Image (cartoon, rainbow, N blue to C red):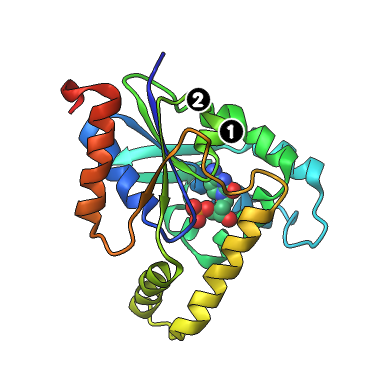
């Protein structure tokens, strides 16, 4: 069985960075499942299915199955293509995030994306980054990590990002937005954001990326043995 390491958790917790480092260090494949939801959201926008408060779920499901999405490794970076168009930059936009969160709340869409995500499980191994990697997509993964950080810490990081992009926002407003999104994610009926029963919880509050990565590496050693790196 090809090994999988699941890294789940809320947004703004640093999953992407840790998952990328780990996949690079192990020489394994990487699944950025959020990018799939984002690409689907953008494609639905282009096809006029979104925005819509009551979107055509059957159309979204069909689009999810047929989405001509490709991840290509170029110069140590992953670029995402829709058909032959590079959508890597557009994927990171707040709009793509909002559209993704709308399509991600629909269970027929989540089901339609399951096989696509499972295809990433290729030798020698996979690091899977998302919300439901350990609970739904790869329930048999030998190592499941649920990454958390305090609302304050995630708000600080988000504020810094916004400032770097030239946006202004107050820390309080960003904190309130994150707390509200956490509540929605935990309480939604479809794939709520919760750790798998057998996940190990990694709280990165007050830790540098390097410190968090060391803890993660320790768990990888415990699970797969010293020889893996
Ligand atoms: O991690 P991200 O910000 O790229 O995720 C974008 C959206 O997709 C976010 O609303 C959560 C959702 N998502 C999900 O529901 N399940 C996943 N496995 C990954 C992302």
Q: Earlier in the sequence, mark 1 or mark 2?
A: 2
Residue 76 seen in the figure: no
Quarter of the figure with residue 110 = top right
**Residue 34 in the image: above or below residue 114:** below
Gap between marks 1 and 2, in whole Å? 14 Å
Q: Is residue 53 above or below residue 2?
A: below
Q: Which residue is mark 1?
A: 136
Q: Residue at x 37, y 74 (%)?
A: 156
Q: Which mark is residue 117?
A: none
Looking at the image, residue 92 lies above or below residue 26:
below
Describe residue 86's horizontal placement relative to residue 50 as left or right.
left
Q: Considering depth in this image, is 109 or 175 the residue closer to the camera? A: 175
Binning the other alpha carbons within 10 Å of mark 1 as few (below 14), some (14 to 19) or many (20 upward) gives some
Is the C-beta of the residue carrying label 1 under 8 Å from the nearest atom of ligand 1?
no
Q: How many marks?
A: 2
The nearer-to-camera label among 1 and 2 is: 1
Please give the label number shown on residue 119.
Answer: 2
Q: Secondary structure at mark 1?
A: helix
Point out residue 153 in the picture as x, y percentages from the top left corner.
37, 69
- Residue 166 position by quadrant: bottom left
Most foreground residue, 210 or 194: 194
Residue 179 makes an appearance in the image: yes
């Amino acid at each position: 069985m090809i090994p999988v390491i699941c890294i789940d958790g809320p947004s703004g917790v640093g999953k992407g960075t840790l998952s990328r480092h780990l996949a690079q260090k192990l020489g394994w494949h990487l699944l950025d499942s959020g990018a799939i939801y984002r690409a689907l959201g953008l494609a639905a926008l282009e096809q006029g299915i979104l925005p819509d408060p009551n979107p055509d779920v059957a159309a979204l499901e069909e689009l999810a199955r047929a989405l001509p999405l490709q991840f290509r490794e170029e110069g140590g970076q992953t670029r995402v293509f829709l058909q032959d168009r590079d959508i890597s930059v557009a994927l990171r936009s707040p709009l793509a995030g909002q559209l993704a969160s709308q399509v991600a709340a629909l269970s027929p869409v989540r089901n339609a994306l399951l096989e696509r995500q499972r295809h990433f499980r290729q030798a020698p191994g996979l690091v899977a980054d998302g919300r439901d990697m350990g609970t739904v997509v790869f329930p048999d993964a030998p190592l499941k990590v649920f990454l958390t950080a305090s609302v304050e810490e995630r708000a600080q990081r988000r504020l810094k990002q916004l400032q770097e992009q030239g946006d202004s926002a107050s820390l309080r407003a960003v904190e309130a937005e994150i707390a509200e999104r956490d509540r929605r994610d935990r309480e939604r009926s479809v794939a709520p954001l919760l750790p798998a029963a057998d996940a190990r919880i990694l709280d990165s509050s007050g830790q540098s990326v390097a410190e968090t990565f060391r803890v993660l590496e320790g768990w990888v050693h415990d699970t797969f043995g010293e020889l893996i790196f």
